[in-house]
Amino acid sequence: MADRIRVAAPNGDDYDIHIGAGMLEQVSSFIRGKAVIITNTTLAPLYGETLASRLPDAAVVTMLDGEQYKTLETVSQLYADLVAVGLDRSGTVIALGGGVVGDTAGFAAATYMRGVNLIQIPTSLLAMVDSSVGGKVGVDLPQGKNLVGAFKQPNAVLIDPDVLATLPDREWRCGMAELIKHGLLADEGLLNPDLWTKDNAAELVRRAVQVKVDVVQQDPYERGIRAHLNLGHTFAHAIERVTEYQWLHGEAVGVGLVAAVRLSAALGLCDSGLAEEVEDVVGNIGLPTRLGKLDAEALYAAMGTDKKWQAGHSRFVLLKGMCQPVIAEDVRKETVIQILREMADVP
């Protein structure tokens, strides 16, 4: 039996998150009007075509696979494709894929004909526990991540843990980065390595999703505590930009979590023991904990377009202790650079 988590959204746009095996076989009951499945070229033959065959008059539209295609150019092509298959304002976009597909297809759904229905069906662990929940959609610019976007509440989020059976191990680890983040923010039990198996996927997803729902319901438009969900992400987005997305998002988040807690300790917000604990947790799941040869100055410069920074003043999400997030403002550049250099120099 599927779990259901109700999300109270602004303007009465409440929706349910359904988590359970076999959810892909129940999609038809959530569809309004014509359905258009937006997915990527990797997932279309795996799940997209089968899903379309279960829906009356459904079409499949594909985008290329990878963060580098989360752009306005891709959205422009999606608009053309939606017109070509005859989607009107009564129809539904189904975003079937990981975070890139969810964000990009979601932004297309938010803006095509001033908004059409949206169903999020995340197929990666990362998308299940993070990007599919909360209504934030958007794309990247060359200057930084997620600089163009909207708030678009889905009509429903359908999470089928069965699809994780085909998820590559590297993608599983990337999803665990966001799950570890949620553990550090509000559910320390998620840091128990005994739970970190695909056999426990449904429980892991349910608990991590609940953490995010609890936050976004309090701050749906990210004007306050919702920024806590960006723990580690100021570092992570800089890594992705400097490496031109050669690092996967979850790998960058893993290092970003280590850097954020190291910075917390350097500022006296928490003791060094917490930094060591977080580094062990991130390393134990198989995520990187070092920056390699990445240049500290280049990384800091890339942070300048972070959405949390205001009027050129730095803002980092840090920890005062386990499950005690805080936003620190005007952190000295020298302190951040020192943390980045320490993480690059250690083999």
Image (cartoon, grey):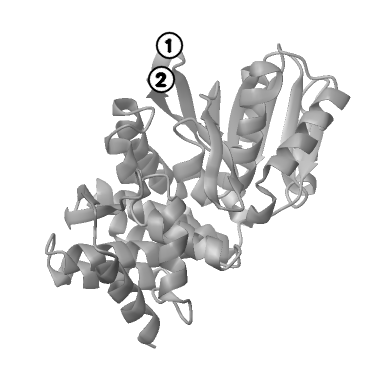
- Circles 1 and 2, Cβ within 8 Å, touching? The answer is yes
Residue 94, position as x, y percentages in the image: 67, 30
Instruction: Residue 255 in the image: state x and y as whole percent.
Output: 40, 67
* Residue 72 drawn at (x, y percent): 69, 40
Residue 278: x and y in percent read 27, 66
For label 2, the SS is loop
246 or 202, which lies in front? 246
Q: Which residue is mark 2?
A: 9
Dot 2: few (<14), some (14–19), or many (≥20) neighbours within 10 Å? many
Image quarter of residue 334: bottom left
Disc 2 residue type (three-letter): Ala
Residue that appears at 74% across and 23% down: 35
Residue at x 61%, y 53% (from the top left corner): 142
| Mark 1, other Cα within 10 Å: few <14 / some 14–19 / many ≥20 | few
In the depicted structure, whether residue 181 falls above or below residue 2:
below
Which amino acid lies under the numbered mark 1 shown in the image of this protein? Gly
**Closest to the observer: 24 or 126?**
126
| Dot label at residue 12 | 1
Does any portion of residue 286 appear in the rendered image? no
Q: Residue furthest front?
A: 311
For residue 69, side relative to residue 283 (left or right): right
